[in-house]
Image: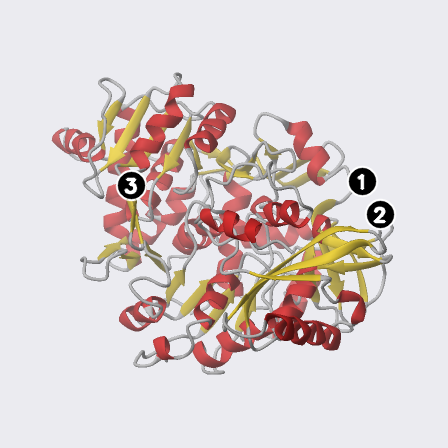
């Protein structure tokens, strides 16, 4: 069964894209009509990019949870909505049907109301990857509260900064969280954060790890105790609050160049339509498929492609509490085999880390249920793409290389699985409704193919960022002021002879070597092609002759070989793939790279080390392993 707006052939894709460009209002109006609205919109779109001011489905009334839950009850009440795989494979998993999820969301929505939460209030959610995290999001949306999820690895100071920026008076957290062989004391971190946030009124605590915690009288309450109170009151019905299409749904913080996090605001109507539309089309979701996105709900990928997109489509979404390498490097494949996963959506950094373990962890696992593989978070290098396709997909699964950002709400550029062609290391073609352009430094559009430039979007899509919370000017200057009349992504991009787009890295991660612009992602891709390389990160550093030199931090499979010979081999690989201009000037072999717990490489730390600035590296507490930084500093060339 196809969804009303599902594209099933390449011809249909081109028809849809052309229609979306010729008449965006008619196109998105037709897509949006497939959802449940309390009141239809009066006008599809108003916009200008100067202020900026973008509004979709103006006058439309809805509640996103009625689309994620209520509308599925008549036919799919007993369909699994969420499958939860715990961190410890010996612990009991959980399968929550749409009927059960609907009940649990209404329960917790009443808990929020009983604790004083009202429409428009900001609720900070700081939890591990448990089903209650999704329940808390949906409960906030049910009553019109604005949720702000903070990834469960952030420090107390980072939480405090976000709480103060959003003036979030309510918090939902856990006593602790499991992640691999570690136990993370979430409630203790919240307590430290609240020393600077006396305005917080309530902290609702889910018991997960049985970690001893401090519960402050009148402020802290246990999740289960509050659920029991709701149950004692009888049937916990909670009618969905009527929301305007442009009412805020959530705030999600992303790093900013100033060091102060930016609170990206997404709204109810447009976000729902676009997240669902892209979920169904990019992954070619079919009813009954098991969708496994390995991201954390603390990031935009988890919001859009674990919670809102799949549930709005009536899909079965799999939440995983653990990590891909614990208790061994076959954990992903255990999960795929156990639940007969059909769609696997993960990050290149996870793929590369698993590649380092070889093929043995894959042996003995039945992966034949897989139909679609997906990549998200950064450009995937060719070697990882081919490994993923060959050894996991058995060359029988399309690989969708998705490009998008927190500010976008959903995937902007990607092939559609099995519908439009893929190309290794290319995001390929824009989704319907997305009008990408390449511009030079002066903002002049670069016409034609086989060209490179800065990637902008010249027309809004339904889930585009509306503002940065409490500071609209920051939204304007960050995204709309650089190239007037366009949304600037901050990424460099190459468009090939067929119009396929390849992201070459952040513009601030583009090096200027002897007057030549070289994307760090491009150099990393070339280095990673070497058979002895597991992963690399490239930054620029001051060079007396070239202006900028190329400094590469490289993880190798063999740490006991001849370093100088290995350096020469890597340089020859880069020379062969890109050219002599891109050869690294310095190659430092490292055992690990500084990464956040989500797997993102923090290149600003590497850049400072390469530049010789060892003392002022900024906050490293959010790293997966802060000790990595000291090891890299000691080995600096």
Location of residue 343 in the rendering, given as x and y in whole percent from the top left corner: 42, 68
- Secondary structure at numbered mark 1: loop
Marked residue nearer the N-terminal end (2 or 3): 3
Residue position for label 1: 484
Q: Considering only vertical position in the picture, is 132 above or below 236?
A: below
Location of residue 191 in the rendering, given as x and y in whole percent from the top left corner: 33, 27
- Mark 1 vs 2: CB contact within 8 A: yes
Q: Residues within 10 Å of mark 2 (few under 14, many from 20)?
A: some
Residue position for label 3: 105
- Secondary structure at numbered mark 2: loop
Location of residue 501 in the rendering, given as x and y in whole percent from the top left corner: 70, 64
Residue 443 circle label: 2
Residue at the location (41% across, 50% down)? 296
- Secondary structure at numbered mark 3: helix
Residue at the location (37% across, 62% down)? 324
Q: Left or right: where does residue 69 sit relative to residue 249?
A: left
What separation in Å lies between label 1 and label 2 (alpha carbons)? 8 Å
């Amino acid at each position: 069964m196809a969804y009303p707006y599902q594209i099933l052939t390449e011809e249909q894709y081109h028809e849809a894209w052309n229609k979306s460009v010729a008449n965006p209002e008619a196109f998105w109006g037709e897509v949006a009509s497939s959802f449940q609205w309390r009141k239809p919109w009066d006008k599809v779109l108003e916009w200008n990019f100067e202020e900026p001011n973008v509004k979709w489905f103006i006058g439309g009334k809805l509640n996103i949870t009625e689309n994620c839950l209520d509308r599925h009850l008549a036919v799919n009440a007993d369909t699994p909505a969420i499958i939860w795989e715990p961190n410890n494979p010996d612990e009991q998993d959980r399968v929550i049907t749409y009927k059960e999820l609907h009940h649990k969301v209404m329960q917790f929505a009443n808990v929020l109301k009983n604790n004083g939460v009202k429409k428009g209030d900001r609720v900070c959610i700081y939890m591990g990857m448990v089903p209650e995290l999704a329940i808390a999001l949906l409960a906030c949306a049910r009553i019109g509260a604005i949720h702000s999820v903070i990834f469960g690895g952030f420090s107390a100071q980072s939480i405090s900064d976000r709480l103060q920026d959003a003036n979030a008076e309510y918090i939902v957290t856990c006593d602790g969280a499991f992640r691999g062989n570690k136990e993370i004391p979430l409630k203790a971190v919240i307590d430290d954060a609240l020393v600077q946030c006396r305005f917080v009124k309530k902290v609702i605590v889910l018991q997960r790890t049985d970690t001893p915690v401090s519960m402050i009288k009148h402020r802290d309450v246990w999740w289960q105790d509050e659920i029991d109170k709701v149950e004692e009151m009888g049937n916990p019905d909670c009618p969905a609050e009527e929301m305007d299409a442009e009412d805020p749904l959530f705030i999600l913080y992303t790093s900013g160049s100033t060091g102060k996090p930016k609170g990206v605001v997404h709204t109810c109507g447009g976000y729902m339509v676009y997240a669902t539309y892209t979920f169904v089309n990019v992954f070619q979701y079919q009813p009954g498929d098991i969708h496994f996105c390995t991201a954390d709900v603390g990031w935009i990928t988890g919001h859009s492609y674990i919670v809102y997109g799949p549930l709005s489509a009536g899909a079965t979404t799999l939440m995983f509490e653990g990590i891909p390498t614990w208790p061994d490097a076959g954990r992903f494949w255990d999960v795929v085999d156990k639940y007969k996963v059909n769609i696997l959506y993960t990050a290149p950094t996870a793929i590369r880390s698993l590649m380092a373990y070889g093929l043995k962890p894959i042996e003995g696992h039945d992966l034949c249920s897989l139909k679609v593989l997906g990549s998200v978070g950064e450009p995937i290098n060719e070697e990882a793409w081919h490994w993923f396709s060959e050894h996991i997909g058995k060359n029988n699964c399309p690989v969708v290389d998705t490009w998008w950002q927190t500010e976008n709400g959903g995937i902007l550029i990607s092939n559609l699985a099995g519908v439009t062609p893929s190309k290794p290391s290319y995001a390929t073609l824009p989704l319907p409704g997305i009008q990408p352009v390449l511009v030079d430094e002066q903002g002049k559009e670069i016409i034609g193919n086989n060209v490179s430039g800065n990637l902008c979007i010249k027309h809004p899509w339904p889930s585009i960022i509306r503002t940065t919370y409490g500071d609209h000017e920051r939204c304007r200057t960050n995204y709309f002021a650089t190239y007037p009349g366009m949304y600037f992504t901050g990424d460099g991009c190459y468009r090939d002879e067929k119009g396929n787009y390849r992201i070459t890295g952040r513009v601030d991660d583009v090096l200027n070597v002897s007057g030549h612009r070289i994307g760090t992602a491009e150099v990393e891709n070339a280095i990673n092609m070497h058979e002895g390389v597991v992963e690399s990160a490239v930054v620029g550093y001051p060079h007396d002759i070239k202006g900028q030199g190329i400094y590469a931090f490289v993880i190798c499979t063999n740490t006991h070989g001849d370093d100088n010979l290995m350096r020469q081999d890597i340089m020859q690989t880069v020379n062969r793939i890109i050219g002599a201009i891109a050869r690294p000037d310095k190659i430092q072999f490292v055992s690990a790279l500084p990464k956040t717990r989500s797997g993102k490489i923090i290149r600003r730390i590497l850049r400072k080390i390469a530049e010789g600035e060892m003392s002022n590296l900024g906050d490293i507490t959010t790293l997966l392993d802060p000790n990595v930084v000291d090891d890299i500093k000691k080995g600096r060339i």
